[in-house]
Amino acid sequence: MYVCSMASPKLKVLTLNDKIEAIRLLDAGKPAYKVAQDFGVGKTQIQNLRKRKLELINDFENNVPGESKRRRYLTGNEEINSLTYEWFKDASARRINISGPLLKTKALNFAEDLGKTDFKASQGWLQSFTKRFNIVFGSMSGERGDVNKQTVAEWTNKLSEICESYNPSDIFNMNETGLFFKDTTKKTFYTKGEDCAGGKRSKERITVALCASMTGEKIRPLVIGKSRKPRCFNKIKTESLPVDYYFNSKAWMISAIFEDFLKKLNRKMKAQKRKILLFIDNAPSHPSIDLSNVEVKFLPPNTTSLTQPMDQGIIQATKLKFRKRQMVHMVKEVDKCSTICGSDILKKITILDAILWFSNSWNEVESQTIVKCFAKAGFKIRPSMESCENENIENHSDDDDDADDDVPLAAMKLSRELFDCEFREFVHIDNELCTCDTETTDWTKPASELLKDFSHDDHQSDSESDIEEQGLCENASISLEDALSMVEKLKLFSANKGHAAMLLDLVKMEEFLTLETVTKCKQVKIDDYFGSVTRDQAELLQLPMSEH
């Protein structure tokens, strides 16, 4: 009698990308056995992913190759690897040529500082390190220097080749700009770089990042403030704001925030099954990062005034609309109280006001304004699409270019009184405002101190920003009944003025408040409905007697 045995089939090994997708499906409520069927693996393998969820997401966020199938194990060299990687990102941002021997030397220096005498910066360690952090060595093109027409011309000629495999709708540009949202003096005109980095004036600024495509698609703005949750936010969650809100002690763009922005954008494009090309400048806060659905390309150093679409008018158009809102707000406040001065009004403007104004301003920037600015920076539409795009551009009304045409005369007068300049000049008061840390990390410090610096959350306590805005939201509680009454009055106002769009928005607001009223109703005792009842009535109704 012969016994025939069959070898069990080899189970499929999931890649990191597969695991992240499986976790997403599990979080969406899909049963584990169905997810297992989708990936052709066992149910237990999928269930184990739940236990490793945080570890896998951390790997994904830290740029571990998506096709990696091996589980990461602790080696005892995590501190050395972490410091070496931070040094690598800092050096890369400053366009320093980094070789394998240089990485090894730096790792040995950190190991010596940390007392890790048994650490060997071998070739095996280097291969493992570069694979772990998805680092690829290659030649570096370009170097910092003065802008010249030849550099710009060469770049413009190369653009068509760089963009050849992408549709115009998948070509993006992103850039940051500083924004004073409550400044009052002419000194702003002369404040540059580090002068705005700290001290009293830095409390009056935010950093905003805008990103858009060659065809006018706009990405949600990114805003960086100084506080985790400014008091003016009250009970508003930062996730519900119309921007992606971040914070750090100087309201600057830093590498960690930029990486998070890129990873969010990558996830969005992956969900849309798109691969995009993103052009950025070579600021120190813009590290190179390899992503599955976003290819990052650096613009030539010191040429962004000519080669970056955002700098050709997109940011200016948005700021014009923002400043118009700011000045109209001030005129309204001056009309309400004739004794208040403009500087006092500006001081009461909160970061929440600035966020809402800027978001609305960005939404109002027309697609064709963005298209024109890309064209001005040398991004040309392919011949097959050129005639259609040119027709659209010719029909563009240039509303964004003339954003100050409909600014009230009172607002223009106020800008001259407060800032000693015309309204359009007022837009440029923060052009030279620094948006990232230009100071490099002091790598001569002991490794133990560097570890503390990198592990320390660079975000300040909320107290500093709260003091600045203290009292703005205190004693401002309004009941739902009061809110509904106000809406009713506004509906009457909009009807009398013939503002149909406003009336529709107010109806939606009324429905929202009515729903809030229903959900906030307190549950009362049944005795409150029936009042005081006799024992016989209670027995008849089968109600417990109230104790009197």
Image (cartoon, helix red, strand yellow):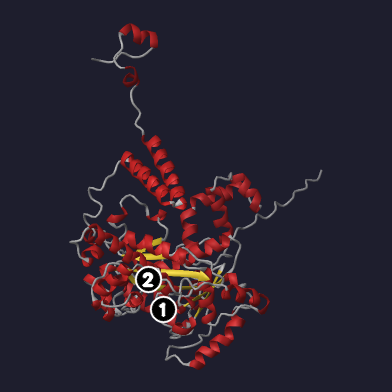
Q: Give x and y (percent) for residue 189.
A: 28, 79
Q: Up-down: is 450 above or below 273?
A: below
Task: Say if mark 2 contacts mark 1, CB within 8 Å.
Answer: yes
**Residue 251, image quadrant:** bottom left
Q: Residue at x 45, y 63 (%)?
A: 74
For label 1, count other residues whose C-alpha is less than 10 Å away and answer few (under 14), some (14-19) or many (20+).
many
Q: Up-down: is 306 above or below 217?
A: below
Farthest residue, direction left: 339
Q: The N terminus lies in which quarter of the figure?
A: top right
**Is residue 119 at least partly visible in the picture?**
no
Q: Give x and y (percent) for residue 512.
A: 42, 43
Q: Give x and y (percent) for residue 210.
A: 44, 69
Instruction: State the SS at label 1.
Output: loop
Q: Give x and y (percent) for residue 424.
A: 36, 76
Q: Nearer the viewer, residue 401 or 140?
A: 401
Q: Which mark is residue 283?
A: 1
Between the residue at mark 2 and the residue at mark 1, the CA separation in whole angstroms equals: 10 Å
Residue linked to disc 2:
253
Amino acid type assigned to the residue bearing label 1 in the image: Ala
Q: Which mark is residue 522?
A: none
Task: Tally the numbered discs.
Answer: 2
